[in-house]
Image (cartoon, rainbow, N blue to C red):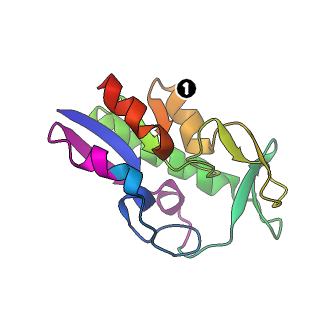
Amino acid sequence: MQFIIISACLLGQSCRYDGQCREYPEITPLCSRKDIVLIPVCPEQAGGLATPRPAAERSKNGVFTREGRDVTAEYERGAREALRLARLYGCRWAVLKEKSPSCGSCCIYDGTFTRTLTEGDGVTAALFRKEGISVVSESRIPWLLEQL
């Protein structure tokens, strides 16, 4: 049995920054596998942020809202909580929401609030990689399923 930690928003939980619930059809093949158990987590909520909450983006200096509020501590706390949960279940893989300042992997918004993408990882994705947990975004699920 494979335990995989996953961004809760990808499973339809209303934990996105805007409080909206979206469907992510790319998750369906992952959910249909009987040998996989998905462990949902929202690092932003785990770090103490409310839903809905102001949009935030990661820059070199931390994570900030459009209004300039520094929410780095909350994002770091949420990342540590997500890591604790991943370790509790022995997760070797994480499926995290792309472009997010917390969960984004390889490509995130650049901190200018202009919808400009840049190379980099969100706070949780970076911590997971540092701690040896392989991170993929929802668009890479077909590749992940080939690896399992």
67 to 61, vertically: above or below: below
- Graded by Cα atoms within 10 Å as few (under 14), some (14 to 19) or many (20 or more), the crowding at tag 1 reads few
* 103 on left or right of 85: right
Is residue 146 left or right of 43 when viewed as pictured?
A: left
Residue at point 65%, 53% (across, down) = 73
- Please tell me whether residue 69 is drawn above or below residue 107 in the rendered image: below
Q: For residue 124, which quarter of the picture?
A: top right
As shown in the figure, which amino acid type bears the numbered disc 1? Lys
Tell me residue 16's x, y (percent).
Answer: 52, 67
Q: Which of 111/86 is in front? A: 111
x then y, percent, for residue 94: 41, 38
Name the residue: 63% across, 44% down. 122
The span picked out in magenta is 28-50
Q: Nearer the viewer, residue 106 or 17?
A: 106
The residue that label 1 is drawn on is: 130
When asked about the image quadrant of residue 112, the answer is bottom right
Quarter of the image containing the C terminus? top left
